[in-house]
């Protein structure tokens, strides 16, 4: 007896056995896979300039030092600032003495300002009016009215965080009219070193045109406040009392107090 699948013994017949086992069933062929749809090639979008700009801005901000994007604090000398200095003044008073008849009543006002048109460079102006009425012990009454105007330019040089050098050049003109009421006999008064004869009623006119250089060092004690001190020089281009010329020159130092906004 020959088992299925066993090779026949030597000498056995080559014919297959009648009881040969039928061949095993073949597996069913796989179902066809549907073909994938053809894909379109990717479209190339134009460069996004906005995105590039945003990325560049972010890169610049990252590279900049911390706090660089914050607005700088306002500082004396920035364009558009107004400065009020020590020339801004007003006064009113009456002066009398316990003995004698000397009295004086006076009033004065002098508004002044500077304006920074560009960085650390300024132009400015001031005007003044002064009035006085006095009586001397010898019976001479005087009434005086002064009017004047001054223009100036200057520059501010920073020497440190709170110290600056601020020279300014000024050109000014003023006039004073004084009326003297004296007794019937003649008197002589001294006006700026000139002897002027007076009668019962005399009006004296004084004119001046001057140039001034003032160069203070400013100490900025607070954000909008400063004090200063420095050399002060002025000389008259014209100074006359009536028809007599008597020009002046001054060499000294002056202080100032001011603020800005």
Image (cartoon, grey):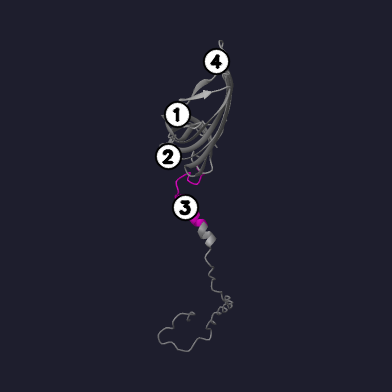
Helix or strand or loop: what does disc 2 sit on?
strand
Q: Which residues are magenta?
A: 54-72
Mark linked to residue 60: 3
Please state which of residues 259 and 50 is positioned toward the viewer in this rendering: 259
Q: CA distance from mark 2 to mark 4?
A: 53 Å
Mark positioned earlier in the residue sequence (3 or 2): 3
Nearer the observer, disc 3 or disc 2? 2
Helix or strand or loop: what does disc 4 sit on?
loop
Q: Residues within 10 Å of mark 1 (few under 14, many from 20)?
A: few
Q: CA distance from mark 3 to mark 2?
A: 32 Å
Q: CA distance from mark 4 to mark 3?
A: 82 Å
Mark positioned earlier in the residue sequence (1 or 4): 4
Residue 172 appears at what percent x and percent y? 50, 36
Nearer the observer, disc 4 or disc 3? 4
Q: CA distance from mark 1 to mark 3?
A: 49 Å
Mark linked to residue 157: 2
Whether residue 203 is visible to the viewer of this picture, yes or no, is: yes
Occupied quadrant, residue 143 = top right
Residue 254 lies in the magenta-colored region: no
Mark positioned earlier in the residue sequence (1 or 3): 3
Nearer the observer, disc 2 or disc 4? 4
Please state which of residues 173 and 259 is positioned toward the viewer in this rendering: 173
Query: Contact (CB < 8 A) between labels 1 and 3?
Result: no
Residue 245 appears at what percent x and percent y? 46, 32
> For this view, does 52 lie left or right of residue 253?
right
- Kindly identify the residue that appears in the image at 53 percent across and 59 percent down: 51
Determine which residue is flagged by label 1.
254
- Kindly identify the residue that appears in the image at 50 percent across and 56 percent down: 55
Residue 258 appears at what percent x and percent y? 51, 32
Q: CA distance from mark 1 to mark 4?
A: 35 Å
> For this view, does 194 lie left or right of residue 127?
left
Residue 69 lies in the magenta-colored region: yes
């Amino acid at each position: 007896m020959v088992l299925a699948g066993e090779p026949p013994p030597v000498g056995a017949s080559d014919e297959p056995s009648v009881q040969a086992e039928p061949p095993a069933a073949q597996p069913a062929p796989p179902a066809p896979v549907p073909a994938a749809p053809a894909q379109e090639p990717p479209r190339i979008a134009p460069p996004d300039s906005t995105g590039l700009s945003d990325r560049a801005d972010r890169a610049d901000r990252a590279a900049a030092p911390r706090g660089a994007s914050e607005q700088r604090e306002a500082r004396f000398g920035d364009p558009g600032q107004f400065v009020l200095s020590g020339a801004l003044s007003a006064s009113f008073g009456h002066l009398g003495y316990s003995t004698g008849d000397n009295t004086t009543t006076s009033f004065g006002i002098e508004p002044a300002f500077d304006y920074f048109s560009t960085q650390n460079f300024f132009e400015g102006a001031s005007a003044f009016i002064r009035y006085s009425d006095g009586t001397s012990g010898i019976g001479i009454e005087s009434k005086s009215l002064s009017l004047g105007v001054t223009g100036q330019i200057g520059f501010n040089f920073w020497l440190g965080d709170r110290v600056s050098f601020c020279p300014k050049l000024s050109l000014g003109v003023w006039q004073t009219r004084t009326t003297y009421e004296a007794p019937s006999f003649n008197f002589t008064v001294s006006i700026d070193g000139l002897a002027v004869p007076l009668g019962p009623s005399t009006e004296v006119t004084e004119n001046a045109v001057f140039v001034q250089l003032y160069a203070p060092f400013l100490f900025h004690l607070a954000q909008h406040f400063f004090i200063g001190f420095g050399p002060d020089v002025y000389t008259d281009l014209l100074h006359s009392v009536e028809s007599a010329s008597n020009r002046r020159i001054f060499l000294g130092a002056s202080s100032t107090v001011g603020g800005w906004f």
